[in-house]
Amino acid sequence: MSASLTLVIVMAVMYAAGVYVMLERSLTRVLIGFLLVGNATNLLIFIMSGRPGSSPIVTGTSVQDMVDPIPQVLMLTAIVINFGITALLLALIYRSWWLAQLGDEGDTLTDEHATEGAADATFRSSSDDDDAIAESIDEFERGDGATSDEDTSKADAAGRAGASASDERNAR
C-alpha cells in the first residue's frame, strides 16, 4: 500500500504543531500539544497499518485478504493512554487554577480544632509509657510482679506490713 501524501503531510504538521505548542509554559498549551501529538501518533499507526482488507475474525476468507490486527490494537492502546494522560493534565490544570485563585492564602487549611485545648490534656507522653514498661519489668524481675491492679495493691500492702514488722523488730 502506498500511503496517501495528504495523510503524511497532515501527520507531520500535527507533530510539528504539537511539539511547538508543548514547548510553551502554560499547562493548557501543553495539553493541546499533547493532544496533537497523540492524534498524530494515531494517524502514523493508521498510515503504517498496511493495505485494507477483510476482518481477521470473519471466517471463510484467505489469509492474504485479512488485515493485520496488531496496528488496530496499538491504535486503541494509544487512544486509551492519550485519554488517561489528558485526564491527568486536566486535573493538574484545574488544581493550578484553583491554587492561583486562592492568592496569598495558598494551599493552607484552617485549623478547625485550634480552640479545643482539652483534647491535648488527655494524651500522655510516650516517656510515661516507657517508664511504666520499665517499672513493670523491674517488678517482674524482682518476683513481686502482679497481673492486675488488685494484686498490685495487695502486694504493696503486704510489702508495707512486712516492712513495718521488721522495723518493729529492729526497734526492740
Image (cartoon, helix red, strand yellow):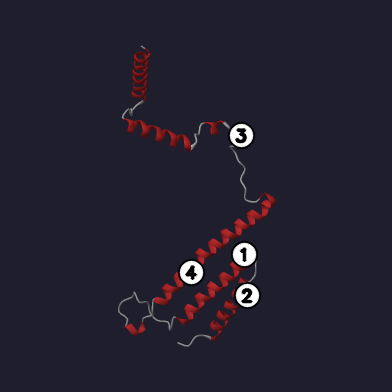
Q: Residues within 10 Å of mark 4 (few under 14, many from 20)?
A: some
On the rendered structure, is 118 left or right of 138? right
Q: Amino acid at mark 4?
A: Ile
Q: Earlier in the sequence, mark 1 or mark 4?
A: 1
Q: Residue under circle 1?
A: 27
Single out the mark in the foreground, 3 or 2. Answer: 3
Q: Earlier in the sequence, mark 3 or mark 4?
A: 4
Specify the quadrant of the image occupied by residue 37: bottom right
Q: Earlier in the sequence, mark 2 or mark 1?
A: 2
Q: CA distance from mark 3 to mark 4?
A: 52 Å
Specify the quadrant of the image occupied by residue 118: top right
The quadrant the C terminus occupies is: top left
Residue under the image location 35 percent in, 30 percent down: 139
- Label 4: state its secondary structure: helix
Q: Residue under circle 3?
A: 115
Where is residue 70? Give x, y as percent. Answer: 40, 76
Where is residue 110? Give x, y as percent. Answer: 62, 43
Single out the mark in the foreground, 4 or 2. Answer: 2
Residue under the image location 58 percent in, 77 percent down: 14
Q: Amino acid at mark 2?
A: Tyr
Where is residue 91? Give x, y as percent. Answer: 56, 58
Q: Residue under circle 2?
A: 20
Of the numbered discs in the image, which one, if any, rests on residue 79? 4
Q: Residues within 10 Å of mark 3 (few under 14, many from 20)?
A: few
The quadrant the N terminus occupies is: bottom left
Q: Which residue sits furthest bottom? A: 2
Q: CA distance from mark 2 to mark 1?
A: 13 Å
Q: Residues within 10 Å of mark 2 (few under 14, many from 20)?
A: few
Residue under the image location 50 percent in, 75 percent down: 42
Q: Earlier in the sequence, mark 4 or mark 2?
A: 2
